[in-house]
Each structure stands twice: as C-alpha cells, then as structure tokens.
Amino acid sequence: MPQFRIGTDDFKELIDEGGYFVDKTLLIREIIEGSKVTLLPRPRRFGKTLNMTMLRYFFEKTEISNAYLFEGLEIAKYPEYMKHQGQYPVIYLSLKDFKRASFESFLQAVQIEISRLFQTFSHIQSILDNGRKERFLRICREEGDIDDYYSSLKELILYCYQYYQKPVIVIIDEYDAPMIEAWTNGYYDKISQFMRFWLGGSLKPDNALALYRAVVTGILRVAKESIFSELNNLKVCTTLQQNNLASMFGFTEEDINKILHDFQITEHGLLIREWYNGYLFGSNTIYNPWSVTTYIDNLPDEPGPHWLNTSSNLLIYEELEAGGPEIKRDLEHLLSGQDLRYPLSETITFKDIGISPSNIWSFLYFSGYLCADDPQPDIRGRSAYRLSIPNKEISFAYETFIERIYPGKPGGLDALMDWFIHSNPVIELEKLLQDLALQLVSMYDLAKLPEAVFHAFVLGLLANLRYVYEIRSNPESGYGRADIIMVPKSPKYPTAYVIEFKSISQKKDLIRSCSSALAQIRERGYPVVVHNVGIPLEQIRSLAIILQGKQVMVGEEGVGENRKGLGFCR
C-alpha cells in the first residue's frame, strides 16, 4: 500500500524513503522554457517547498548524481530537458524560518542563514582577490555588517558563476514569510528596504550573464513596487492566469482520481471533493494537497480542517475585523452561500489591503480563503471575478472569525445555536441577541448602520448551522425579500425560520415596530418559499428582531393552523 510522508517537503528525502509522489516534474520544463526570473505566488501548504527542492535536485551539480531521483517520472520522457540535470550551481534558500518579532531579530536570522549558505560554497573563495575574500570570510564568520548582507546574494551569484563557469540557478522559497510577520509586528518598511537591496538587487538584468534562472515563491505578490520594481526580466505567474504552471501546485482532478485508485479508496472521493476541492488555478480545478494527504493518512478518521491547523490566521481575522460595514455585508453574503463579484488586484501591497473591499478580498483570495472564477468586465473595464467560499474546510476559518468577535461564554455562540435547533421560547433568543448587541456597540457607533451590521453578524453566527439548515440571506420570497430564511435539511431538526430585522429610532415604539415587522412577514408571504419546499406551516417560525440603539426586542408570529394570527413580543 502506498504511503504519504506527511511533513516531508524535501524531494530527495521523499523519493529515497519510497513516499508517494504526485508527479509535478514537468514544472522543470516550464522553468527551462520560461523567463529569467519567475515569481510563483501560491497559498501556503500547496506544495511550493516540495517543488522547489525538486528543482534544486534536478539542476544542482553534485559529486554524486541525483539523476536516479527522476527515473520513471514525466520529465524523464524528455531527453532535451534531462540534459540540464546536474549541470548548474544552485543557490537555494528558504525564508519561512526568518519570521521574527523585530527587525533586529530578523537581521540576526539573516546573519546566521547567509553565513551557512556562504559556508556551503567556501571552496569558491580560492578565486577571490584579498578584498572580496575578506568580505566573504566575514559573512562566513557571522561578522558582516548590514552592507555586507545587502550585497551578499548578488556577490554569491557572481562568485559561483566565475568559479563554475556556468550560469547560476537561484531558488528562494517563501520570500514573503518574514514580510507578513513584519507587517504584524510593525517593521514592514524596514524589511521592505532590506528585501529591495538583497533580493531585488541580486536578480536585476545587470546580473544576467551570471544568472540562468531564478524561481521565487511566496503567498502574495506583495511590495512589487518596492522589491521587484527594477526587474524587467520578471514573470509573475499567479493563480488567476491561464498557463501550464497553473496545474503544478496542488492536486488536479486527474491527480485525485489517480490517488483514489492507487490507495484503493475510491469511495472517499465525494468527501474529499466536498471538504478540500473548490479552488480554481487558471482553468484547473485544484484540491488542497496538504489536507487531502492528511485526510488519507488519518483514515478512518472523519475529515477535518487540516490546512487551517498548520498556521496562524491572525492577519486574516485582523483584516476582516478592521473592515467597515461593506466588508461585513459582503461577509454576510459569503456565509449564506452567495457569491461576491469584485476585481482582484495581483499587485497589492500590505499597505493597500485595508483601503478598499476589493483589496481585502484580493488578499483573502491569494491567501487561499476564496475561490475566484467567471471574470466579467466591470464598469471600468476591469475583470471582476465571482468569489465564493471554496469548501467546508475554509468555512471553518470564517466560523472561527465569528467566534473571535463573539467569544464563547455562558449565553454565547453555543447557546445561540442550541436555541435554533431546539425551538426554545422566544424570550431566550432575545436575551442572547441582547448580549450580542452589547458586544457590538462600538461597531454601531462607527458604522452608523446597526441593522446591516447586526444582520450580517447574526447571519454569520447562524452559518455554523449550515449543515443542518439551508440558510439564505435576502432571498425573494412571496411579495418581497425576507432578511433570513432557514430551511431544515434533516428531519431531526424540522423547524424552519423566517427572520426580519428592523432598526428604529429612540422616538419609535418597540412593541408597535415589532408588530409591524411581523405583519410585513405575514402580508408579504415570506414563509411561502419555505412551505413550497415541503415544510408544513406549523413548523415555520416567523421572527422579528428589532433594534433600538443597544436594546433588542424579538417577536414571533405563528403561521400554522394552531397559532394562526397570534403575534406577540416579549
């Protein structure tokens, strides 16, 4: 039986240990035929490091040949590309462990790792003059100053070219990992300056003869203006683009079918598609590889949010929480299973993210929290994409965000969920929602749209019940649009709900407003859409939720035979 080596992201180690490998070796062909410098933004845990180490072992000139690693793989079918195997000096560096709380700590990590890198090439100092050799040795001894490190990568490329008489291949994995950390910890400008000199300056066209290919991976194409601005030899291949690289990260539908066959688990295909499918890179359907392999490795355990458990989502939650009422209304639509349509920016910087909703959704998309498809020109001629939550796993991320802004405590989220599935008295719901309104008071003051904000977050909380209920926001129903409709999916929880929100001024009467909202539900026939799918009228509860400043009132009107015409508040 084949076996995944979970956590093994070194290509040679995986092959030597007989681990199951989903063949992505044609990436080598794309790099050979591609641009001088290629930037490959992909979400985390989508196979970037495994692919980068694969490139390293293919191109790197070593005393003992690594050609055996590629026997039987797709690239071995192409002798014109195999002739490049083991022919180049390779400079390989991963920045994923450069994440630090301060710029000073980051520079210490740079000092240690660049020293280690230079030590692996210590033999090339024999060709250096005294001045360059002294600088080389300072870096090896971790005694260099910041100017030494600014130019270290550029000089190492040049030295390797002169020593080997062959152009160099540079592989930088997860270049933006320390930049994401820097943004969170407040030293983003300092690290951007360093990266502009160290990385951007090393890959410039004036180093063209010494450089054969450079491949850089990350999550975002961040800080393009400040880091890669002078690279006219740079090709950026994002997940929105239609090219052969689109299928090289993550598992395609063809990959999944082969995996299911090889592991003899074809009956698990539906669950895997429901939980880990939903991404679209170019025109390719893509599955999250980390989650798929972890799920299969954990069988017979049930599926779960494996990808979300591998890293902090703090930055994602901070951006959502800082967003204004438009973001919260958009989030409401996503959580209710609806789509958004926005242009996506492939060149955003961290400073751009909070400026507009489209930038926040761009950030979420490139980070792997949204699916984008069906681009259509908007009024300004930009491609506006249809955005949606890709799968069950990512739904958990948004649930966690909701729990973050409405923390679990007595009378909190769990109690709210219990109220709906157990059809409790309406006065208990009023108490729960009153507590929620008090927690969101600052949002009321800032947004000035209490009804929209409250509607959005109640809907977000109810999204936790989406496996029990089909939850719709603002659906056409009867002669209008109900705010929220909840249709049961299981006979175990037979009660359906129709909910109407109203925000009123301090001058208006709460009880009359509640009665008016209930009358609107009845007169416009909002429960009709629920009844038309087979739910008996006596199992439909109509609720009016009234907000007056920070005060909440909940009213209910029965529409079944036994409660017809009965309306009450409190």
Image: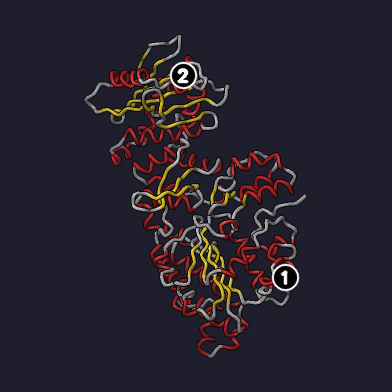
| Residue at x-position 41% and y-position 11% | 564
Amino acid found under the numbered disc labelled 2: Ile
Q: Which residue of the protein is positioned furthest toward the right in this rendering?
A: 1
Question: Is residue 228 toward the left or the right of residue 291 in the image?
Answer: left
Q: Which mark is residue 488?
A: none
Q: Quadrant of residue 440?
A: top left
Position of residue 302 measured from the top left corner of the image (x, y, whole percent): 65, 38
Q: Quadrant of residue 87?
A: bottom right
Which residue, given by chain and number where applicable, does mark 1 sit on? 67
Q: Which residue of the protein is positioned furthest toward the top in this rendering?
A: 562
Question: Which residue is nearer to you in this view: 30 or 563?
Answer: 30
Which residue, given by chain and number where applicable, does mark 2 sit on? 540
Q: CA distance from mark 1 to mark 2?
A: 68 Å
Amino acid found under the numbered disc labelled 1: Ala
Q: Which residue of the protein is positioned furthest toward the bottom in this rendering?
A: 129
Mark 2 crowd level (few <14, some 14–19, many ≥20, 10 Å Cα): many
Mark 1 crowd level (few <14, some 14–19, many ≥20, 10 Å Cα): some
